[in-house]
Image (cartoon, rainbow, N blue to C red):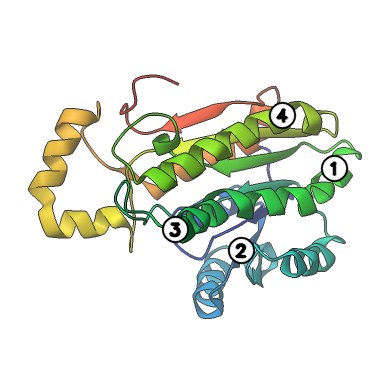
Amino acid sequence: MDMGLAGTKVLITGSSLGIGFAIAEAFLQENAGVILSGRDEALLKNASSTLAKKYGSDLVDFFVGDLGDFATRAALKKQFSDIGINHIICNIGSGKSMPVMEESEEEWRRMFDINLYNSVGVVHDLHSLLAANASQGGDTSLTFVGSICGMEALGCPLAYASAKAALWAYAKNLVKPLAKLGIRVNQISPGNIIFPGSTWETKMANDADGVQSMLNNEVAMQRLGEAKEVAKAVVFLSSGNASFITGSNLVVDGGQIKGV
């Protein structure tokens, strides 16, 4: 299916590894141009080089910096305002936290900084780039990468689950204001996704039988998901094939949660 994304430009935050990298590659497979971003310059340059060799350097840009910082976001906006951005994927996040009731105040703040406030800052400061394209008749969208941990009590770290729940509330309440600017807003909520360096890779290495037992009991499809499966869902929601979809939370979890 042609997603109609050729020639568009997509900013993917947190895209040097894992799900973010897979999202970038999925857009490149549709001949869209991508802007990778991340804090680790070496990782980001490696990701950019890998994708440029495979899909062409003309389709791959990157930006090094902490997008939790206002000045960094301003620099990104200045650098890419001339080329225009059609889609923004807010993928920055981390689920590595502390056990319930052992979290310090600093840990709560850290979890919300990573999993909520980074995205808030990106949207606040960069949504005008999307609006500029929308004003010229382009299909523009904003997609958040959330988690099923923010939707049900699944035994996830509490601070992480709370931050992801807040992210969905934030996304949902952006729908009407941004629709007036021609911007669609959706979220992807992955379940248990394995990729190099992921928590699930470590868990599988340490206790593959235990992980499989959990999957057999909790997940309808009885397996872990792959980053590329999340990426394909993100590409769909960003494409013209989803032109009448906004305010949706697309769950990609193999049938783990009970409801939406």
Q: Is residue 7 above or below residue 172?
A: below
| C-alpha separation, residue under disc 1 versus residue under disc 4 | 14 Å
Question: Which residue is under mark 1?
Answer: 131
In terms of depth relative to the viewer, which is nearer, 207 or 173?
173
Disc 1 element: helix
**Element marked by disc 3:** helix
Query: Are the residues tagged 4 and 3 within 8 Å (C-beta)?
Result: no
- 1 or 3: tag closer to the N-terminus: 3
| CA distance for labels 2 and 4 | 25 Å
Mark found first going from the N terminus, 2 or 4 = 2
> Which residue is drawn at the image coordinates 64% and 72% (left, top)?
65
Task: Residue 226: give x, y in percent of width and height.
Answer: 35, 46
- Labels 2 and 3: the sequence-earlier one: 2
Confirm or deny contact between disc 2 and disc 3 (CB under 8 A): no
Disc 4 marks a residue whose amino acid type is: Val
Residue in view at x 50 percent, y 29 percent = 250
Q: What's the mark number on residue 107?
A: 3
